[in-house]
Amino acid sequence: MRKVKKPVFFIVFAVIALFALTTVFGVTSQYGDTVTTYVHGVGDIRLGIDIQGGVDVTFEPAGDVDATEEQMDAALETIKLRLANQNISDSETYVDYKSSRIIVRFPWQAGETNFDPEEAVKELGETAELTFRKGTDSSYDEAGNIIPAGDIVLTGADVEKAGTGATQDDTTGEYTWMVTLDLNESGKEKFYEATSELYSQQGQISIWMDNTMISAPSVSAVISDGKATITGDFTYESAKELADKINSGALPFSLETTSFKTISPTMGEGALTAMIIAGVIVLAFIIVYMIVLYRLMGVVASITLIGQVAGMLAAVSGWFGFMSSTTLTIPGIAGIILSVGMGVDANIITGERIREELRKGKNLDTALYSGYHRAFSAIFDGNLTGIIVSIVLMGAFGVPDSIWAKIFNNTIFYFFGATTEGVIYSFGFTLMTGLIMNFIMGVLASRLMTMSLSRFKCFQNKKLYGGGIDVKAD
């Protein structure tokens, strides 16, 4: 690290600047009225219910039905489909198996003026209609909505159950996943007649949930025993998801709304604006403070802090291709602020360690190397502790669909059931992301830029790094 070249500073600075700009503004192109988004910006960040307002509803099986986990999963898939049909893409949906509850939260849509939450909840709780139809043809109703047009082969009442299966390649050992169908007596003859007709035509049987086509497998054999398979490029998760959707069309119970409340969109708007303004002001004060106190080190620290904030916003907006976007809540904003504070603390620790080395009379290169080396253990311990805390928060208070929630809910939190505090997940996510970005920006990028600047003769005065007033490096 002592041999960092002069151009490294400009390379790292350019990368951080480009990263920050694309994070804020995104990357899009427009052809006519069609806008294509390549990189999401801060304008694409999805705001949580506590900021934008929305609906919180809990469904339970009606009557004295003792629903199984498979049936609850199937009901959940139905609700997810209905949310998509209402153009609600930002929602929290999960199951509490112990209490047989399905918990759904979704925010108001941006720019929505005539959204009827009670009607939306009513539609979510209605039983979905599952149909198997000949071909994939569709048409439009009077309102312009797509509706299936093919002749009905089967309905959900003809399906006894759907499941997953797999075959293993003897050579590679890899599994090929598929969806299995078991039809009841009413469905066997119908399916036999349909597959006999479509097999000779190399036709398809499309599967529809209400007015949404969820699959369209080709007919590759005549099925007479009521046992069929749907093959394709399935993983276990995608095969199970399709099986759950098929099972949901034949649910033996209806859902009833046991809890319903609306959250005013004005509840968090003032808090969001105040926190943004406060954050900008505080960041500006921090930058001035760091530059005055640590001089050149403060300039580098300010650049890396901007990069750290950009990294957190990028993670939330879906900038990174390997991870999907997440919802930003007020606790999530608090996580950003807290991680920035820890980033400032890391820069202060590093600056003080370098000062100590310079006051011992060491030359500039040795002081920088030793200062960063001594500071790293303290920064590492503090950030690692914070990351562990954020992971526990994401597992204990996050939606059960997340990887950390699955780990913790199946182990130490098993007896508590599914949480209803999904907004805390945003806090844990932004905190963890901020601390990881602190390692990248506050430790690695800062070190590269500082060591690079120290190669320039005009930046070799110790006072620029907090050393003596007139003493220059050897």
Image (cartoon, rainbow, N blue to C red):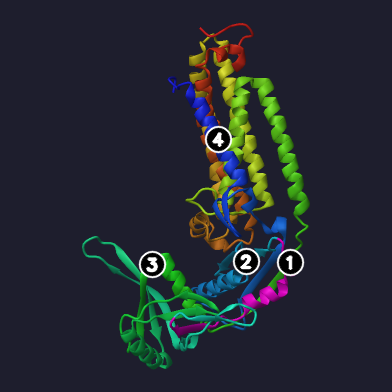
Label 2 and label 3: CA atoms lie apart by: 26 Å
Q: Which residue is mark 1?
A: 262
Q: First in sequence: mark 2 or mark 4?
A: 4
**Magenta stretch holds residue 132:** yes
Residue type pointed to by label 4: Ile
Q: Residue 278 lies in what quarter of the image?
A: top right
Q: Label 3 vs label 1: CA separation? A: 38 Å
Question: Closer to the N terminus: mark 3 or mark 1?
Answer: 3
Q: In front of the other: label 2 or label 1?
A: 2
Closer to us: 166 or 138: 138
Picture residue at 51% right of the left edge, 56% below the top: 408
Kindly identify which numbered label has been placed on residue 234: 3
The quarter in which the N terminus is drawn is top left
* Mark 2 / mark 1, whichever is N-terminal: 2
Image check: 1 left or right of 278?
A: left
Tag on residue 88?
A: 2
Identify the residue at horizontal 53%, vertical 12% (top origin).
457
Provide the residue span drawn in magenta: 111-135
Gap in Å between the C-alphas at discs 2 and 4?
34 Å
> Residue 16, labelled with which disc?
4
The CA span between labels 2 and 1 is: 16 Å
